[in-house]
Amino acid sequence: MDQEGLAVSARGTVAAGHTVTVGDAAAPGRAVLARSLGRRGEDYAARWLRERGFAVVAANWRSRRGELDLVALDPGTAELVGVEVKTRGGTGFGFPAEAVTAQKLARLHRLVADFARSEAGEAWARCPRRVDVLALVWPPGAALPASVEHYRAVIP
């Protein structure tokens, strides 16, 4: 599902109409499983974007300000896209996109600008930019995600 120009609600969430559950008391070892699921989600998201014509130019790009999960070029708009990938095993603690707050989005927009300036000089420094969120629900034991939602041009 594509959702263009989606703004963050007053609660600081991407997906309007849903509440955010905060303070999941994770058991030891659960963090390792979450990182593994996150990595699998990022790998799947890169393939998913490529299948739709995007050119993925970087993965897990880091600077002193933070990290971009993926950086891609949108073939339809020629925009440089910073992609935040959120993967959850279910929706019991909220929908994946709800974890992307206004503060996080503001940082992602700064990171895309940093990437454009530092990685390609003039070529991407003048390129239009945006931030997308790919939200995956990937149930335990499933071979593929149960759902993939692509939110385009998400703004804080």
Image (cartoon, rainbow, N blue to C red):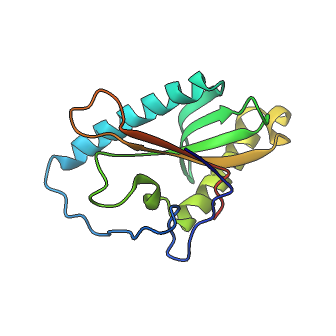
Residue under the image location 86 percent in, 42 percent down: 126
Quarter of the image with the N terminus in it: top right
Residue at the extreme left? 28
Looking at the picture, how far across and down is residue 145, in whole percent? Answer: 36, 35
Residue 46 in the figure: left or right of residue 124: left
Q: In which quarter of the image is the C terminus?
A: bottom right
Q: Is residue 113 left or right of residue 58?
A: right
Q: Which of 125 and 80 is in front in this view?
A: 80
Number of numbered discs? 0
Q: Where is residue 86 in the image (x, y as percent from the top left)?
A: 43, 47
- Residue 71, placed above or below residue 55: below
Residue most extreme to the bottom: 10
The x and y percentages for residue 66 are: 53, 51
Q: Nearer the viewer, residue 56 or 49?
A: 49
Closest to the observer, 80 or 18:
18
Q: In which quarter of the image is residue 139?
A: top left
Residue 123: x and y, percent? 83, 32
Which residue is drawn at the image coordinates 41% and 41% (left, top)? 147
